[in-house]
Every structure is written in structure tokens, then in C-alpha cells.
Image (spheres, rainbow, N blue to C red):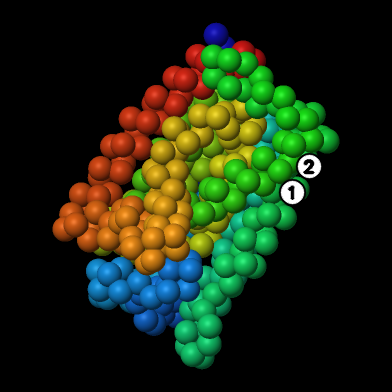
Amino acid sequence: MTIIYLSLTKVFLASAVAFFIGIAITPILTDYLYKNKMWKKKSGKVAPDGRETPIFNELHKDKEVGTPRFGGVIIWGSVLVVTLIFWLLPLIWSGTDKFNFLSRNQTWLPLFTLLIGALVGLIDDWRQVKAEKDCKNAGLSFSRRLGVVIVLGLIGGYWFYFKLGVMAITLPFIGPFWLGVLIIPLFILVMIALFSSGVIDGLDGLAGGVMAIIFASYTVIAFFQNQIDLAAFCGAVTGGLLAFLWFNIPPARFYMSETGILGLTTALTVVAFLTDSVATLPIIALPLAATALSVIIQLLSKKLRNGRKVFKVAPLHHHFEALGWPACKVVMRYWVIGIIFAIIGMIITLIGGPKL
């Protein structure tokens, strides 16, 4: 019983400390972002196929401009700080080593992918802001960002296969599905799929709320699988997300942007494989899956049906906006759907998943 209490304390403490660190560093970041006008100078975007997006641009003609990017720094910054605090704490306070959740087999890789993805996203956000000032092409190209994701996926797949000896994924209520070395390309594909879902960062509070629900779910899953370090890591990410969400609820003080969403989606891939829940990931992260799928359907429809579209505008949340739904209604309903399917996914994973 004492061990359970210590484990719960470790997880909840990581989450709470990350939240308060995120709240504490926000005024510093906000002051810098607004003082240096770190926002887009022109609203709107182009579709992944390079075409214009007139409906989206009309819906968001008065948005994005004047609201800084880089809000994701709050998320990964708070996770990094709380990880360092809990790692260094035993050096100055004996008996606190039980709270350190930095471990080779559970948290090295998700922390690594979170920070590398966040750094690449930070470069993209910085270039977008600076390039628009100089009237150049904004941000890193899609192919470059995709290339980074593929490299991270290759590193992750290599780590799982050669270092952790993972050669199968569990199909709920069925058992292990053996892949051998094919676990590496599967890891890459899952990371690419989650990367494509990053376009969910399009409405105030949407990405932050959805991601907080997903990582909170994985906190529970990892805890019941007795992966306490991983549970504490996911708890810390959840705490950082809630701190970000506190300031991202409409009207947003800043946007998550690439430095947040790219780090989160790459780290989520690792967490899904560590918990052997790849098969249930589309359920736990249904809003992400629906977002990515809506973009794919829209692109294929326009390509194969002579430009005809399935949705008024993709991704899906902007389709609902185009139908006349207020943005806050779209966001709240995504949260509700996210919670329901996260619960369903947790139940399937814990009951029908691997018995650890």
C-alpha cells in the first residue's frame, strides 16, 4: 500500500509542479512575445497541396494576426524544468530519489523526442515570424519537417527493436501480433500519422484541451501498467498542457504553434509504443485521428473527383466552423468527444491489452 501511495504521489506531484512552473514562466514569455511582436503578419494559409484556402482565410481573416506563436514553450519548458528538478533534488535533499522519473527504459526516449520535435518546431515558428518581416517564404518547408519526423521515427524504431527488444504489438482481446524488424517502419508510419494530425492546432483551446485529455489518459494507462516513471512523465506533460490551456482559452493569449504540437505528437508516438497501445491509439486520440483523416479524404477527393470536396474546408473542425458553429462550441464538443473516447480507449487497453 505504501508503494502505491508513493507512486501516486510521484505522478501527481510531477503534474502539479509542471502546472505551476508553466503558470510561473508564462508572464516572462508573454512579455517577450508581445514586446517583440512574435506573431504572423498576415492571416490565412495554403492547403497541403499548395492551393489557396479561401473559406479558411475568410473565417480567420481577423485572427492569427496580433496573437503570438510559441505558446508551446510553456508545455515543453515546464516538462523540462520539472524533470531536471526531480533529477537534481536527491543531490541536495536525501530521500527524494523516489520522485526522479528520468529512466532509460521509460522516459529517455519520449523526453528526447519531445524536446527535438519542439526545437524543430521552434525554428519553424521563428522563421515564420522573421521571414514574413522580410517578405520571404515562411517557416520550414513541409518536406523538411517531415524529414525530421522520419528521422525521429527511425531512431525510435531502432531503440524499440534493438535496445528494448520490442518485436510485436498487442491487439486487444487477441494477443501479440509479431512484426519483428517491421516494428521500425510501423513506428515511423505512426509518427508520420500523428504529425499529420498536428493541424488540429487551429482554434483557441482546441489542441491544448485535446492533448491534455490524451496525455492524462496515458498517465492512467502507464500507472496501471506499473510504468510509474512514464506515468509521471505523462502527468508532467498534462500539467504543462493545463498551464498552457489556462492562457489559451478564448481569447488566446498565444498559440501553441509548431514548437508545441510537433513535440507533443512525436512524444505521443513513443508513449503509445511504450504502453503497447498502438492498436487503441486511434480511439484514445480520436480527435487527432479524425483531423488527419479529414485532410486525407479532402485531398483525395479533390484529386480524384475533379476538384470536388467532401468537406466545406479541412481539417474537420474548420468544416464545422464553415457550417456556422461558433468556435467555442466546436472546441467544447471536441473536448467532450475526446474524453468519452479516451475513457473507452483506456478500458480496452487495460482490459484487453498486455498483462504486465
Q: Nearer the viewer, residue 288 or 39?
A: 288
Q: Are marks 1 and 2 in contact (CB under 8 Å)?
A: yes
Q: Which mark is residue 37?
A: none
Q: Which mark is residue 154?
A: 1
Is residue 16 depicted above or below 5 in this figure? below
The amino acid type, in three-letter code, at marker 1 is: Leu
Q: Residue at x 59, y 72 (%)?
A: 141
- Dot 1, how many residues are within 10 Å of its Cα: few (below 14), some (14-19), or many (20+)? some
The N terminus lies in quadrant: top right
Q: Residue at x 39, y 24 (%)?
A: 344
| x and y percentages locating residue 15 in the rendered image | 48, 37
| x and y percentages locating residue 128 in the rendered image | 51, 77
Q: Residue at x 27, y 70 (%)?
A: 55
Is residue 333 depicted above or below 37 in this figure? above
Q: Which mark is residue 158?
A: 2
The answer to whether residue 343 is visible is yes
User: 215 left or right of 311?
Assistant: right
User: 88 left or right of 197?
Assistant: right
User: 309 left or right of 211?
Assistant: left
Question: Which quarter of the figure has residue 88?
Answer: top right
